Amino acid sequence: MAAAGLLPGSSDRPLRLAFVAYRGNMQCGGQGVYLWFLARELSRLGHHVDVIVGPPYPDPMPFAGSVTRVENEMFWAKWFMKDWAHFLPEHRALGVFEPLHFYELAASRLGFLPEPFAFSLRAFRAVADRLRAGARYDLVHDVQCLGYGLLGLRAAGLPVVTTVHHPLSVDRRASFVRDRGLLEAIGTMQFYPIGMQAFVARRLERVITSSIASADRIRRDFRVAPEKIAMLGNGLDTELFSPDAEIERRPRGLLCVGRASDPNKGIRTLVEALAQLPADVTLTLVDSPESEARKWAAELGCADRLHLAGRVPTDELVRLYREASLVVVPSRYEGFGLPAAEAMACETPVVTTSGGALAEVVAVGGGGVTVPKDDPGALSAAVRQLLDQPEQLRRMGERARPRIQAAYAWPHIAERTAELYREVADGDRRLG
């Protein structure tokens, strides 16, 4: 007999899926991009997808069966941005005393990240309401929340899988690099809900991730059994990220997509490498005009060769990829390395470091070279060598695009994910 909330099984019928994601907008990180495109592709394959999502909310999702916006007052974001004028709810100030709102307020002020836990409880309530109203699902897919509320969904009889691009332990290590003094280090220790996420991850049916490096980190840091980890790759919109023969390359123009404020992105190493390159090599960095990279470049005498593009819309980012002679990804760690894959999809070669999964992505595409991380000399030498061989650069770019399409185009990722769903759902029914 099937558990409550589950549909009777059939190997070829469309699946009914519930996605839960505590942040849904594409501008707030990879989880928003992943949610929107995977839901779209699964819908194109004929599956029914309902989305339960927290703020910032996603772009319109007309392909979804329904989109339920789970509200919160975003106390942590307001506290982080010091937005005191809008900190309390404007229309119902007493709402702050509702249990979850009060928890988020208190946790934010004490230096904890409250969103994953609070959202997971709200998502549990939203899915439970749907089940009581007659909805039935084959599976729930969590996107990087890993809050305790997911265990409530499992207790209700629903199989749950999650996607983790990289565990929060990676972000915590990067924060330690940035911390100045003991108090900031203590703040880092208490901020990330790693204990909760590891506890939940070990109890879900599968943990989906995008690279061998990320799978290894999840196994080691979250202690998830290897057989529960599914490495499916990351999706890429290869129709959007594509070459355009009418756009001319900037001679000896480099591009990097990354924030100097994130130590994992290795921007300081890249600026040091730029200072070692010839005076005709320029760098466009997709980062805020107030980026610390400007100060570093001034100290090293190469500020006139650095352009800070700010946060650009997607179509402008595609144009920058198409214009660049070479894309540089100097990260200290990447769970996947989307800029490297996006660049190769645009037939633009890449130089990356050995941080995390970058070497895997470059090996798949065959459109770049990898150097040791945190080594500006090796980075500058690789960039110089490739820029001095424009014909080799062109061939590398042309070779990479079809290989990136075959490995990472969203339709392929969706098909692999749907196969995993069926494996999980069918196994759950057999056990039931």
Image (spheres, helix red, strand yellow):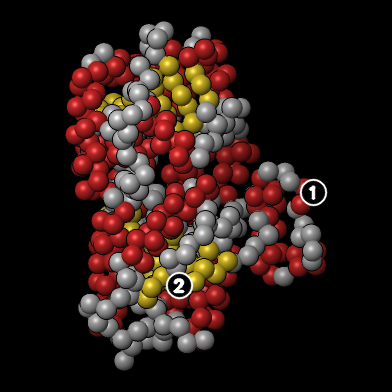
Q: Is residue 206 left or right of residue 99?
A: left
Label 2 sits on residue: 65
Q: Earlier in the sequence, mark 1 or mark 2?
A: 2
Task: State the residue at coordinates (75%, 53%).
Answer: 87
- The N terminus lies in which quarter of the figure? bottom left
Distance from disc 1 to disc 2, alpha carbons, whole Å, reads 37 Å
Name the residue type under label 1: Ala
Q: Is residue 338 left or right of residue 359?
A: right
Task: State the residue at coordinates (46%, 24%).
Answer: 284
Specify the label residue 85 is tagged with: 1
Q: Nearer the viewer, mark 1 or mark 2?
A: 2
Q: Is residue 188 left or right of residue 338?
A: right
Based on the displayed image, in which of its 4 quarters is residue 360 positioned? top left
Q: Position of residue 195 (x, y in %)?
A: 48, 57
Task: State the residue at coordinates (40%, 9%).
Answer: 280
Q: Is residue 305 above or below residue 142?
A: above
Which element is circle 2 on? Answer: loop
Name the residue type under label 2: Gly
Q: Position of residue 278 (x, y in %)?
A: 37, 8
Q: Position of residue 131 (x, y in %)?
A: 48, 83
Which element is circle 1 on? Answer: helix
Q: Is residue 86 above or below residue 162?
A: above
Q: Position of residue 52 (x, y in %)?
A: 51, 68
Tell me, yes or no, whether the two marked residues, 1 and 2, touch with CB atoms within 8 Å: no
Question: Looking at the image, which is closer to me, 242 or 105?
Answer: 242
- The C terminus lies in which quarter of the figure? bottom left
Residue 151 in sight in this render:
no
Task: State the residue at coordinates (58%, 55%).
Answer: 56
Q: How many marks?
A: 2
Question: Looking at the image, which is closer to me, 412 or 182?
Answer: 412
- Disc 2: CA contacts within 10 A as few (<14), some (14-19) or many (>=20): some
Please, which residue is most extreme toward the bottom here? 1
